[in-house]
Image (cartoon, helix red, strand yellow):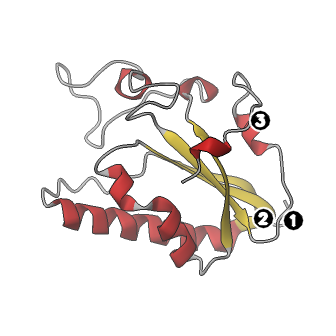
Amino acid sequence: GEGGFDVIAFHFPHVGLGIKDQDENVRANQKLLGGFFRSCMDVLGSQGEVHVTVKTGKPYDLWKVCAVAKEATEGELELKTAFHFDPSDFPPYEHRRTLGFQEGFSKEGNEEISGRGKQGGAGAPRTYCWRRKGAKASSAKRQLRKGGTDGDDDDLLD
């Protein structure tokens, strides 16, 4: 609202450069995310939210998404919650690797992410939700998770 977006979402960001060196790969993806967070500040409404969904486990945990958001926005974005990503909330979403669908290699539909511990086990995708510092709470999480629970997912916060 108020001249900007209510929700800006980036699901499964990845630079897709095929970088084999893990440290270099982590830095490249942190740079991508840092630029994304900085750009959001220019177009995010005063009560808006930024959502980023990443897989869990290596190398994604090494990206330190929350720390990147804080540094890139000089603390202007505050992490408010995190919740399990459910692709059914975004029909007709189908997860794809960076290279797109490859016959014989890629999995159909959302098998790539839905088989990874939907209830928060290892590899389960997680959506982090930030708001501008001082912004009031909203119901964007419930709106996005229409089929999910309204339960408190604060246990997902690092």
Is the N terminus in the top left, top right, bottom left or bottom right quadrant?
bottom right
Question: Contact (CB < 8 A) between labels 3 and 1?
Answer: no
The residue where tag 2 is placed is: 45
Q: Nearer the viewer, residue 116 or 37?
A: 116
User: Residue 51: x percent and y percent?
Assistant: 61, 51
Crowding around mark 1 (Cα neighbors within 10 Å: few <14, some 14 to 19, many 20+) is: few
Classify mark 1: helix, strand or loop: loop
Pointer 2 or 1: first along the chain: 1
Q: Is residue 108 left or right of residue 146?
A: left
Q: Is residue 11 left or right of residue 4?
A: left
The residue where tag 3 is placed is: 142
Pointer 3 or 2: first along the chain: 2
Question: Contact (CB < 8 A) between labels 3 and 2?
Answer: no
Q: Amino acid at mark 1?
A: Glu
* Cα separation between marks 3 and 2: 19 Å
* Outermost residue, bottom side: 74
Question: Contact (CB < 8 A) between labels 2 and 1?
Answer: yes
Does residue 54 lie above or below 31 as drawn?
A: above
Is the C terminus in the top left, top right, bottom left or bottom right quadrant?
bottom right
Pointer 3 or 1: first along the chain: 1
Classify mark 3: helix, strand or loop: helix
The residue where tag 1 is placed is: 2
Q: Amino acid at mark 3?
A: Arg
Residue positioned 77% across, 30% down in the render: 150
Q: Amino acid at mark 2?
A: Gly
